[in-house]
Image (spheres, grey):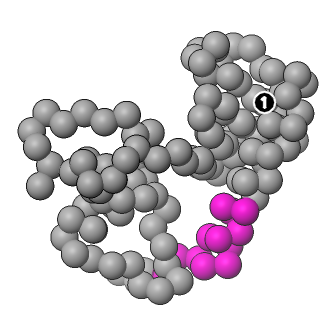
Amino acid sequence: HVPKGTVVGQPCMSMDFAATIAEACGVVPEAGQPFDGISLLGVLSGKEPVRERTQFWRINRADRVQKAARKGNWKWIREGEFDQLYDLSKDPGERKDVAYLHPDVTRELARLYGEWEMIFKNNPPPKVIA
């Protein structure tokens, strides 16, 4: 049970909704097929503290290919072969790319993104036939 009006400071994204709803319903994902997101039920119910996490996402369309990661105040984006890095605590509008000032952070977020992407390359979603 989550009390009405509960507000927490846990960073989340839409991919977390499926994992949260599944846990609330007692549904466990099949072995080797993890959810893209995490369940927020423990944090929302007050049974777990807000946790640090790195978030990843991608856009893969004919007109745009983008990879991205966010960890703390850092947001890394790769469009094509170009890396961008933003410090969201100082630049929430993402106007000043600071990748050249923080190459270590840029490399680390790119590495973490690569590890995340490998999880799904090694465990592709099941094919659904309608």
Q: Quadrant of the N terminus?
A: bottom left
The residue sitting at the bottom extreme is 31
Residue 17, image x and y in percent? Answer: 33, 54
- The residue that disc 1 covers is 84
Residue 36, image x and y in percent? Answer: 49, 62
The span picked out in magenta is 115-127
Q: Is residue 75 above or below residue 3?
A: above
Kindly identify the residue that appears in the image at 42 percent across and 59 percent down: 38
Kindly identify the residue that appears in the image at 18 percent across and 36 percent down: 6
Q: Amino acid at mark 1?
A: Gln
Q: Is residue 122 above or below residue 18?
A: below
User: Left of 11 or right of it: where is 109?
Assistant: right
Residue 63 placement: quadrant: top right
Seen from the viewer's position, the closer of residues 15 and 11 is 11
Q: Quadrant of the C terminus?
A: bottom left
Kindly identify the residue that appears in the image at 60 percent across and 79 percent down: 123
Q: Is residue 36 above or below residue 62?
A: below
